[in-house]
Image: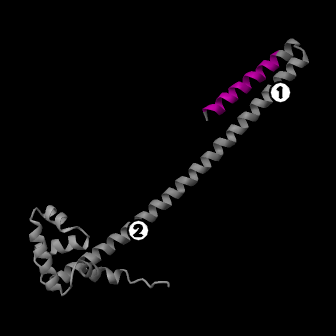
Amino acid sequence: MRNLIIFVIFTASFVTDITLDLQEGIPLKHILHETTLVVLALGAALWQLKVVIKKNMHINSLNLELLETKKSYQDWKAKSHASSQQLGHMIDHEFGLWHLSHSEKDVALLLIKGLSMKEIADLRSTQEKTVRQQATSIYKKSGLSGRQELAAFFLEDMLNIPLKV
């Protein structure tokens, strides 16, 4: 925009100079030379204006796209939050049916999330051996054979998407 203003001032100066030259009787060759420069300056100003308008239109388009993306993200976030809460309730309900202790519930959730025994022990400030014993108790109470079955137990229905083979 600043360049456009400079071009307009430049053009106005040339027009003023040509007008004064005509009044003073300056040779036609000099006036034609200055007129050519004025036309070029006007052309450059119009080209610059076109570029600015085009960029502003692009910026507006990007802003609209950004707003749509933000709305889509917020919608997805709300849906996924509701789904995760529902899944959380389902998991908690199942843990209750399995009669897991509070500690076993914590360990089971961390196992489902994919943390290693050492990571779980570190998070819970306990020994890895204790976590292994709790995991064994979880598998026994649930009737599942291990970590993969535990995760699959809750994820299988969620991921029940028909395969396209």
Q: Is residue 13 magenta?
A: yes
Whole-angstrom CA distance, mark 1 to mark 2, is 59 Å
Q: In the picture, residue 20 is in which quadrant? A: top right
* Main SS category, magenta section: helix
Q: Is residue 6 magenta?
A: yes
Q: Which residues are magenta?
A: 2-20
Q: Which residue is mark 1?
A: 36
Q: Residue at x 17, y 65 (%)?
A: 118
Q: Residue at x 75, y 30 (%)?
A: 41
Residue extending furthest bottom? 143
Q: Residue at x 37, y 80 (%)?
A: 159
Relative to residue 28, is residue 50 depicted above or below?
A: below
Residue in the foreground of this view, choosing between 93 and 131:
131
Amino acid type, callout 2: Trp
Tell me the number on the disc at residue 76: 2
Circle 2 packing at 10 Å, graded few (<14), some (14-19), many (20+), is: few
Amino acid type, callout 1: Thr
Residue 41 left/right relative to 114 = right
